[in-house]
């Protein structure tokens, strides 16, 4: 199986047909989205929030008593 474009691209295309839509996504998705034919800056913006997200994730792990504990089931 080859890599498929990210599932969020289909709703984005549908919205773009009826409105001026702009996709905002995580930087890790940039390559797949450009492979699907979208142009960064025009069709989408990739953001890198790891500077904030990583410490918050570690903090939430500590609150739960360790990684893999608590959370939804």
Image: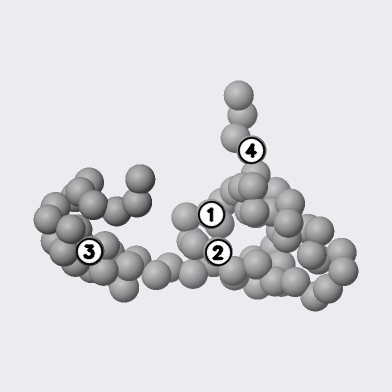
Q: Name, please, the residue furthest toward the right.
A: 18
Comparing labels 1 and 3, the label whose residue is closer to the camera: 3
CB within 8 Å, label 1 to label 4: no
Q: Earlier in the sequence, mark 4 or mark 2?
A: 4
For label 1, count other residues whose C-alpha is less than 10 Å away and answer few (under 14), some (14-19) or many (20+): few
Task: Tell whether 66 sits left or right of 25.
Answer: left
Q: Quadrant of the C terminus?
A: top left
**Residue carrying label 4:** 4
Which element type, helix, strand or loop, lies under badge 3? helix
Which element type, helix, strand or loop, lies under badge 1? helix
Q: Position of residue 4 (x, y in %)?
A: 64, 38
Return the mark for residue 60.
Answer: 3
Q: Earlier in the sequence, mark 3 or mark 2?
A: 2
Q: CA distance from mark 1 to mark 4?
A: 12 Å
Q: Earlier in the sequence, mark 1 or mark 3?
A: 1
Which element type, helix, strand or loop, lies under badge 2? strand
């Amino acid at each position: 199986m080859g890599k498929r474009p990210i599932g969020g691209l289909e709703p984005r295309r549908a919205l773009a047909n009826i409105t001026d839509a702009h996709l905002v996504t995580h930087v890790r998705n940039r390559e797949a989205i450009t492979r699907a034919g979208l142009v960064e800056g025009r069709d989408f913006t990739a953001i890198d929030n790891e500077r904030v997200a990583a410490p918050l994730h570690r903090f939430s792990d500590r609150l739960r008593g360790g990684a893999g504990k608590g959370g939804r089931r």
